[in-house]
Image (cartoon, rainbow, N blue to C red):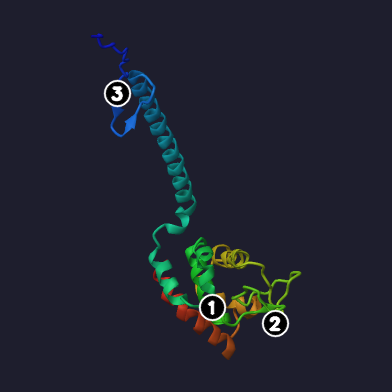
Amino acid sequence: MKKPVKKNLKKTPRAKKIPHFGVFTYGEIDPAKGKLLLLMLAIIFTGTLAVVSSIALLKDKEVAQIAAPFIRPQTPMEIRINALVAGYPIAEMTPYIFSKDPKVAAFMIAIAKKESAWGRRSPVLAGRDCYNYWGFRLKTDSMGSGGHTCFDTPQEAVDVVASRIDELVNDEKIDSPKEMIVWKCGYSCQDLDKTASEKKWISDVDIYYSKLKGYL
């Protein structure tokens, strides 16, 4: 009887267990090196996030610094003026007006009400608004309807008109609508008996100057 032939059976090698780290695997990387790699990636990610956050914070600070003059708390006078001119064209100019001397700003609001109904009746040039809400006449290359100066922007209008009113208020010590009549008729009528039109101008300007005088 023949002895059974032993077959040379080779054992199939077991698959190596791949180390795990949470949901991650190291693959063929040595576990110790894999942990070190993850640590390095975590440090790089954290550092990048910190840099990005710092840049964003700096940009926010820059925006805040630029916007600061526009978001500062309003003074009681500014609140009052904004309430008066809401819905009128001159409302676009109030940020520039508020940057001027308070007394100058008060006269600008009062005179503009009389001269143009806060911009609803104002000179035009070639169909566009001249931003001249004060009846201001200074000979320039751009003259609007009625012989009034025409400005290119609201800010230019405020700066030029405020400069002249500032001279009257702070250099010539004009302190009331009655004295400010020189705005309407020049120095020739300052000390003379006033016409009905001049008296009306003083009265109308005084209505709104008086509303603001208490804030000065």
Q: Residues within 10 Å of mark 3 (few under 14, many from 20)?
A: few
The 10 Å Cα crowd at callout 2, few under 14, some 14 to 19, many 20 or more, is few
Give the alpha-carbon distance from disc 3 to disc 2, as whole Å: 95 Å
Look at mark 3 in the image and give the residue it sits on.
17
Q: Are marks 1 and 2 in contact (CB under 8 Å)?
A: no
Q: As shown in the figure, which amino acid type bears the numbered disc 2?
A: Gly
The residue furthest front is 1
Marks 3 and 2: which is nearer the front?
3
**How packed is label 1: few (under 14 Cα within 10 Å), some, or many (20 or more)?**
many
What amino acid is at disc 3? Lys
Q: Secondary structure at mark 1?
A: loop
**Residue 189 in the image: above or below residue 70:** below
Q: Earlier in the sequence, mark 3 or mark 2?
A: 3
Mark 2, residue position: 146
Question: For numbered disc 3, what is the local secondary structure?
Answer: loop
CA gap between label 3 and label 1 equals 84 Å
Q: Is residue 192 left or right of residue 10?
A: right
Q: Residue at x 50, y 83 (%)?
A: 204
The C terminus, quarter of image: bottom left
Q: In x, y percent, where is residue 104?
A: 52, 67
Q: Nearer the viewer, mark 3 or mark 1?
A: 3
Image quarter of the N terminus: top left
Q: Residue at x 46, y 76 (%)?
A: 86
- Mark 3 or mark 1: whose residue is earlier in sequence: 3
